[in-house]
Image (spheres, helix red, strand yellow):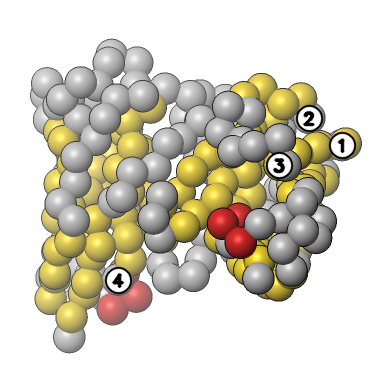
Amino acid sequence: DAKTTQPTSMDCAEGRAANLPCNHSTISGNEYVYWYRQIHSQGPQYIIHGLKNNETNEMASLIITEDRKSSTLILPHATLRDTAVYYCIAEYGNKLVFGAGTILRVKS
Amino acid sequence: DAGVIQSPRHEVTEMGQEVTLRCKPISGHNSLFWYRQTMMRGLELLIYFNNNVPIDDSGMPEDRFSAKMPNASFSTLKIQPSEPRDSAVYFCASSLDRVNSPLHFGNGTRLTVT
């Protein structure tokens, strides 16, 4: 599994887009980029994943650079309920290793 | 779909006692994972199963920890004897046995060993 680097914390205003960056410069060709989040005292929740192409679902969008060395998770209209720790993982297969993640605080 | 079900939600026990944590994966999922979360070490993968068979237990900290999956709908994580440093939140997750299949986590068991 490739090492990922994320900022320790970020703030975002409610209703604005939250853009969470992740560096994975050593990612290999078959490793996917996964994003999960963990709201206080709950289990981690799957958000989205991708390999090469940008992806979008009902929760978020994932933008992966052409060289695949970094990606950005976008929450288009952040709400207070999006306050959580966001984990970026680069992995092949479903044996996921979680790092420290980014604490996202959405403020009113 | 009820999701991954873990029990108990909270467990408080004394050092030296045996502790058993339980997990019911999502029906149809054939991969099951046990994670432990502490402030100091974050989320750690302890062990995972495919089709009820343990595939990788390299994350199991010591022989005091053991995990079983007797059938597709039930798994246990046992600590015997328990120690205060085992205090943590233990999460179970399940997924389909397929590359890039998302993991679905339970709400965890908060274990306190005094």
Label 4 crowd bin: few (<14), some (14–19), many (20+), radius 10 Å: many
Mark 3: amino acid:
Phe
In space, the residues marked 2 and 3 are separated at their CA atoms by 17 Å
What residue did someone put label 3 on?
B65
Do marks 2 and 4 share a subunit?
no
Q: Are marks 1 and 4 in contact (CB under 8 Å)?
A: no
Q: Which residue is mark 2?
A: B52
Q: Nearer the viewer, mark 2 or mark 3?
A: 3
Q: Residue at x 34, y 75 (%)?
A: A81
Residue at the far front in the pictured view: B16
Q: Position of residue A44 (x, y in %)?
A: 47, 55
Residue under the image location 28 percent in, 39 percent down: A55
Toward the viewer: A5 or B99? A5
Amino acid under disc 2: Asn
- Above or below for A55 versus B21: above
The N terminus of chain A lies in quadrant: top left
Residue B28 can be seen, yes or no: no
